[in-house]
Amino acid sequence: MTEEGKWISNVPRCHSDWRTVEFTRQRVYEPHLGEPAATDPLEVEIVEKTRGRLITSSVFYAFPVALAVLFRLTGPAVWTVTAVFTALAALSVWTLACRTRPLGRLLRMPAVVLTPGPGHLLVSGRTVSIALPGPQPRWVVARMPRSKRLLLARERRVFMLGPDARGRLVLRVPGSIIGQFGRVRTAPAPGSRAPDEVAPDAVVIAFVRELRLRAALVSTAFLVAGAFVWVLTEAGAEAFGFPRPNGVTAVFCVAYALLGVARPLQVRSIARAARTQPWTELGVTLDTPVEPHATGTGNTMGRATLPDGRVARVRFGRQPLDLLVNVRETQRLWVLGAPERGRKLAAGVPGHPVLGQVRLD
């Protein structure tokens, strides 16, 4: 085998027929090696919906800013609203130009797998550096959440889309359709060192912590949004003589607050199941294609075969795309605890940063 063959290989995926919880790399979602990711219609639909949402958001955020400038509106509430919407519009435009558009081009490039050996995978904080083969020093440098860094250190296997002419690329760990942007550099990130050994349950523990943090951020965002609705109403009253905040406005603000509480409670239930319940494997047949949303989630429905042989309807409503593509590709669903009809169950992929909820009927 050549030196490059040790690093980048187009190993075909094996079938997903298994009966134990001990995972191998063929039993999770992986890109089709040597093929562009864009050959999967789901990949294209994800990018298109994300692009559409960003364009709509940019126009929505820019509209009140344009009104404030056009009518020369002033006042503390108006200035606050204008500043917030300006920042949101700028963020949407940056994401569209620097993330979504490059991703659409990278999806048209063949996927390859990197399998770095000792000394060729380094970490520095949230940044991973992977050496590429060749006479010149080249390193893939990308930021990853801790759970994916641990999985990469354990599996020594990651999939790469790109790089393009500007050195941009996307890395995906096994079991994930959501990737991280990176670039080709001439040296690893400063302060990089070899990763430590990974404990068997470290990946899931780290991912649960990330879910808790995201839930806290979502909760805070909804609470802030509720307060912002109040400020926005006050700004409209100052600028255009609209009615000042009243009972209807208060109801909207309370609704945002309740939505902010819902996500942490859901994550708490998933975290408890991941900590205390064993994995149960179910065979699944999906009856509908995965319908992605622009928020990294999706919907689908299907049928699951329970351990006693009965068939139950399974519903995936706004669940992580990583969970849905694993079910689609492997025709297997892993749930935490005994599968019971009529309630939501935590589901995921053992040993991987993939967790969500499903309902069996």
Image (tube, rainbow, N blue to C red):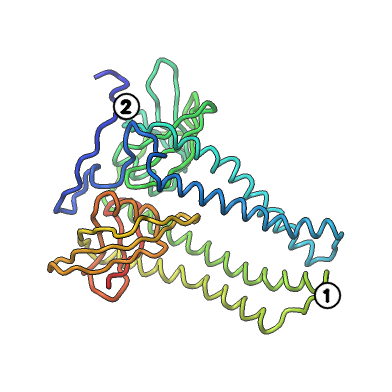
User: From the viewer's perspective, is 235 left or right of 136?
Assistant: right
Q: How many angstroms separate mark 1 from mark 2 (CA)?
A: 66 Å
Asked if residue 344 shows in the view, the reply is yes
Decide: is 106 above or below 56: above
Decide: is 80 above or below 226: above
Label 1: element kind: loop
Q: Which residue is mark 2?
A: 7
Decide: is 254 above or below 7: below
The local crowd at label 2, few if under 14, some if 14 to 19, many if 20 or more residues have their Cα within 10 Å, is: some
Q: Closer to the camera: disc 1 or disc 2? A: 1
- Front residue (pair 73, 361): 361
Q: Position of residue 356 (x, y in %)?
A: 36, 61
Label 2: element kind: loop
> Which residue does the image show at 25% across and 50% down from the upper left?
330
Quadrant assignment for the N terminus:
top left
> Which residue does the image show at 23% across and 63% down from the upper left?
304
